[in-house]
Amino acid sequence: MRMYDLIMKKRNGGELTTEEINYFIDGYTKGNIPDYQVSAFMMAIYFQKMNKRETADLTMSMVNSGEVIDLSEIEGIKVDKHSTGGVGDTTTLILGPMVAAAGVPVAKMSGRGLGHTGGTIDKLESFPGFSVEMPIEKFIENVNTKKIAVVGQTANLAPADKKLYALRDVTATVDNMSLIAGSIMSKKIASGADAIVLDVKTGSGAFMKEEESSFELAKEMVDIGTHVGRNTVAVITDMDQPLGYAVGNALEVKEAIETLKGKGPEDLTELCLALGAHMLVLGGKAENADEARKILEEIIASGKGLEKFKEFIEAQGGDSSYIDHPELFKTPSIVEVVKSKKSGYVKGIKADDVGKAALVVGAGRETKESVIDLSVGIVLYKKIGDFVKVDEAIATIYANDMDKKKVSEEMLLSAYDIVEEKIIASKLIKGIVTKDEIIKY
Ligand code: URA
Ligand code: CA
């Protein structure tokens, strides 16, 4: 087999066989096929697309390019959740304890973030002493006894995807349905999930700006999951503004604590209930989403979710007294409000730009080597539909460097779109895709 022939076949609109896809993934992972051929191949796929079978084959080939985590010693149905991008996405911190409290095992492999804010692990490290370093046996034991544990991701998870994603990123071939779907699903499948709940973002801050293409992407991923025996459900949600109010590591942890107490932002709470409900159904803990939602509401109201969060933080060496005393989290030296220069209604808040404004003050990593400042970030006060007056505070910036704070402030102000006419915020949850149906709200 020759890579040249595969490129030509796809360029001319042909369908790749399973063997051809395996040949390509294997050769590229091992370094036998050069980047320039794969670049051309990705562009051919971008224009000619792949069908369902090719997409499922690509996914499984990427799964098998590295280690496949075996979680079979964990009792129960392991349900994983994935969000397709999102700024200051705190849902994992809230959903984990909530669904664990309902008895669904949460065995999470997580990474450190690059860009915007840190990943889940960085956020959790806001608790002094918290660690994700543990032998796999300990990880499994914790999930079996406490229903929740988070461990660092092995470097060898879907290595083909790691290489391909980096190449797509610099060859303008990221936004192809099959390639995105395969990329995301390969990592979920390799990390041992039995069932998967996807949060597919739509809107200005998402890969898919149009609702219709977001539903298509969701369907593509649900079909892959179904094809390889993983029960998969996707929830399509709005990303025309950041979720919740906090963007930044310790700030998001505090927001998660508030949400587990039932006092969190409305949109964040709603999203966690919606995603969590599907996790409970797939995990076999409820008959349907309505019943599951009631269980989760009770878990918040009774404080069981917050208790589970404490138990989890302690089990991994963290100081859980911070949960009852969030004022213990370090506050940076600069805490300043940002005042609006205009008056009117908030029409949109570019989530990416808010993310960048948080990155500038040190909440995220510009390169893999950057050191994150866990204490810094942004808390928004105004969201879509809110009225704001000139000189009224729209956000607070938490920083440790005045020059960086000033840059961040400019970025934040330009992230806001403020208009004269009254704006009605659109629905957060746009619909659901399951293996049997597509429901649009
Ligand atoms: N996230 C991924 O992991 N892969 C993609 O291709 C796009 C988003
Ligand atoms: Ca947030």
Image (tube, rainbow, N blue to C red):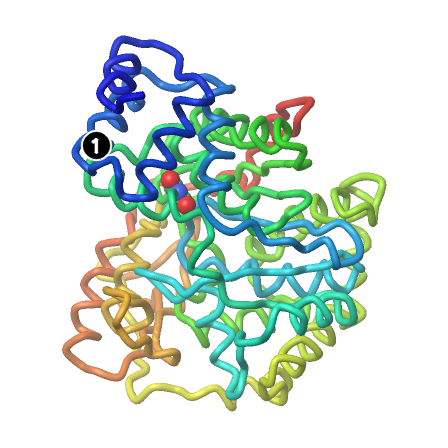
Residue 419 position, x and y percent, is 29, 45
Q: Is residue 198 above or below residue 440?
A: below
Q: Mark 1 sits on what residue? A: 39
Q: Is residue 422 visible?
A: no
The image quarter containing residue 24 is: top left
**Residue closest to the eye, 317 or 307:** 317
Looking at the rendering, in which quadrant would you find the N terminus? Answer: top left
Q: Residue at x 67, y 75 (%)?
A: 312
Number of numbered markers: 1
Classify residue 165 as left or right of residue 192: left
Classify residue 390 as left or right of residue 126: left
Residue 128 position, x and y percent, is 51, 87
**Residue closest to the eye, 94 or 79:** 79
The image quarter containing residue 359 is: bottom left
The image quarter containing residue 142 is: bottom right
Amino acid identity at mark 1: Ser
Residue 298 position, x and y percent, is 81, 61
- Disc 1: CA contacts within 10 A as few (<14), some (14-19) or many (>=20): some
Residue 290 position, x and y percent, is 79, 42
Location of ligand 1 given as a quarter of the image: top left
**Residue closest to the eye, 282 or 152:** 152
Q: Residue at x 26, y 24 (%)?
A: 3
Q: Does dot 1 land on a helix, a strand or a loop?
A: helix
Q: Is residue 262 visible?
A: yes
Looking at the rendering, in which quadrant would you find the C terminus? Answer: top right
